[in-house]
Image (tube, grey):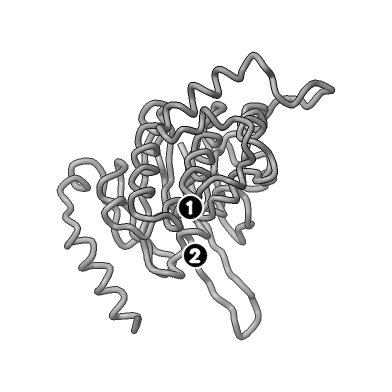
Amino acid sequence: MLELRNVSKVYSPGTVNENCLFRHFSLTIPDGQFVSVVGSNGSGKTTMLNIVCGSIPVDEGGILIGGQDITKMREHKRYRNIGRVYQNPAMGTCGTMTILENMAMADNKNKPYNITPGVNRKRVEYYRELLSSLGLGLEDKLHVPVSSLSGGQRQAMALLMATLTPIEFLILDEHTAALDPKTAEIIMQLTGKLVREKGLTTLMVTHNLRYALEYGDRLLMLHEGHIVLDKSGEEKAALKLDDVLGLFNEISIECGN
């Protein structure tokens, strides 16, 4: 279980640009829940992800995983149990390395780096099988530099690499936003498949309201650091696109957007 307890975050405190994004913000996400998060720019979506991952500190409150307080835990230690896929496909892979080397690097997460070859040849066929499941032909390009792949191919690899080793949480930060519609559909189908098969607790920030409705067990809408919509289970299933879009537009009009 992931818990944010009474979290407060202020940017540029004591200046004319001071912005209190979160004030005593709380959220509980049970194990195995797939949460889709929507909201306008500046609503706190990505900041919430960064707080969970430890990319930015909180000013007040705490972050707990399984009852353990990780508020002071360093970012790199949190990533032992977290996989994250970013909006930019290049951020989840190393372009100068081959597909095989990228897969091996992800496979070595949380393992000691001794004086051994970077690629375990006994795992090559396993990587080939995983890549084949994507249906993108990457299994036949193991020795090709990742920089030569399309954005969609790199994002599919990033998603696969993020979930290659056992993790507790999958963080998706607008991971289809930079892709064309057809490729975005492929990545979302892969996302749903991986989350179901691995039973991952997942936080997905997206601007695509249809994806937010179609995927996940729970839908959150944030506005200025507050949860203005929280639906799960049957209530989420009963939501229509017009319902969510109406609330989104209403908030935008109130803010003058």
Which residue position is annotated with label 1?
A: 173
**Pick the front one: 229 or 93:** 93
Seen at 54% across and 26% down, the residue is 166
Residue 70 position within the rendered picture, expressed as x and y whole percent measured from the top left = 61, 42
Label at residue 22: 2
Image quadrant for the N terminus? top left
**Pick the front one: 107 or 173:** 107
Q: From this viewpoint, which residue is outermost toward the right?
A: 115
Query: Is 153 on the left or on the right of 181, as rendered?
Result: right
* In this view, the mark in front (1 or 2): 1
Q: Number of marks in the image?
A: 2
Label 1 neighbourhood size at 10 Å, few (<14), some (14-19), many (20+)?
many
Seen at 50% across and 55% down, the residue is 87
Q: Amino acid at mark 2?
A: Phe
Q: Is residue 94 above or below residue 143?
A: below
Q: Secondary structure at mark 2?
A: strand
Seen at 36% across and 32% down, the residue is 193
Q: Is residue 217 above or below residue 250?
A: above
Residue 109 position within the rendered picture, expressed as x and y whole percent measured from the top left = 66, 30
Image quadrant for the C terminus? bottom left
Q: Amino acid at mark 1?
A: Asp
Residue 210 position within the rendered picture, expressed as x and y whole percent measured from the top left = 26, 54
